[in-house]
Structures are given as C-alpha cells and as structure tokens.
Amino acid sequence: MCEFCTQHGEGEKWYLTMENYSKDLLNQNERRKYAAEFLNGFDKRVPKSIKQLDKVRRTPLMKLAKPVMTHMQKQDHYGQVVPMEDVEKIFDIVQGAVRLPCVCRRVTTGNMNARYCYGLTMDKELMDSLDDSFSLETLSKEEALDSIRKLD
C-alpha cells in the first residue's frame, strides 16, 4: 500500500475516499491559496529547479540527492497513475471536472495547449484565482470520462 493511501485513505486507495474531494478539505489550511499559487507560479519556479536537477543528475551526487528530491516533490506535486476502472469510480464521487493545460508540459515544452490535466473540485473561487492563460474548460462527468478514455 502506498504512503498516500496510508496517510489519506484510511488504508484504502486515497483517491477513492470521498473526504478527499470535499469542500471542507478545500477550506482548510488555505488550500485554495496554495493551489492558486502553485499553478500560477509553476512556470516561474520550476525551470530553475529543472536546471539544478540537470546539473546534479550528471554527477555521483544523484544517488544521495534522489531521496531528498523525491521527498520534496511529494510535498509539492507528485503524480500517480490511476487505472481506468478507478478513474470511473472517482467520477462516481465528483460532480464534474475542469480540464486545463498541463503545467509540466508548459514548462518543459512551452506547449500551453496540451490539456492532459483535470481539476476535480469545480470550486469557483479557486478557478477565478488562476491566471487567464489556463483557459479552464468545464466538463460534465461524461465529457471528462470520454476525454480521459481517449487518452487511455
């Protein structure tokens, strides 16, 4: 079992735990502010980190640095592959989704049209706090699932 499931999923898959999609959770600890700052500042913050990583990756220090960098990444943004069957279960829990350009691709390739990321909160306050370059696309559950199935 992954550490995220242990910490946030009561021993089950964390992403199938209803509380992880609640407005109450979004209201805690300035999460909206954090999410907006994370997304709006990603393209300014990450290129410097990538350059530093490239320098370290080519040295023997990488073996020592990797666990530290992984720990730091888990605090900020850490991706997880979810099986399609579980994606369908997630969409049984949420109301809909917004599709947005992938901030990782934006930084690494400059492509601001690669819409591979989905936000599941549908929180108007958070959506309004993102800069206009995200051009959020609101999708129903069915539209989001169809879009994700095409990517699968």
Image (tube, rainbow, N blue to C red):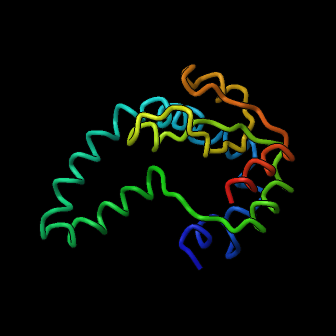
- Residue 117 lies left or right of residue 122; in this view the side is left
- Residue 133 lies left or right of residue 71; in this view the side is right
Name the image quarter holding the N terminus.
bottom right
Residue 71 spot, x, y in % from top left: 37, 62
> Looking at the rendering, which quadrant does residue 133 occupy?
top right
Viewer-closest of 89 and 54: 54
> Looking at the rendering, which quadrant does residue 2 occupy?
bottom right
Residue 30 spot, x, y in % from top left: 56, 36
- Residue 16 lies left or right of residue 68; in this view the side is right
Q: Is residue 74 above or below residue 41?
A: below
| Furthest residue toward top | 132
Q: Is residue 56 above or below residue 30?
A: below
Q: Residue at x 38, y 42 (%)?
A: 108
Q: Residue at x 51, y 37 (%)?
A: 34
The total of numbered circles placed on residues is 0
Residue 62 spot, x, y in % from top left: 20, 67
Name the image quarter holding the C terminus.
bottom right
Q: Is residue 43 above or below residue 85?
A: above
Q: Is residue 74 above or below residue 43?
A: below
Q: Residue at x 81, y 54 (%)?
A: 91
- Residue 137 lies left or right of residue 46; in this view the side is right
| Furthest residue toward bottom | 1
Viewer-closest of 147 and 79: 147
Residue 120 spot, x, y in % from top left: 72, 44
Q: Residue at x 49, y 39 (%)?
A: 103
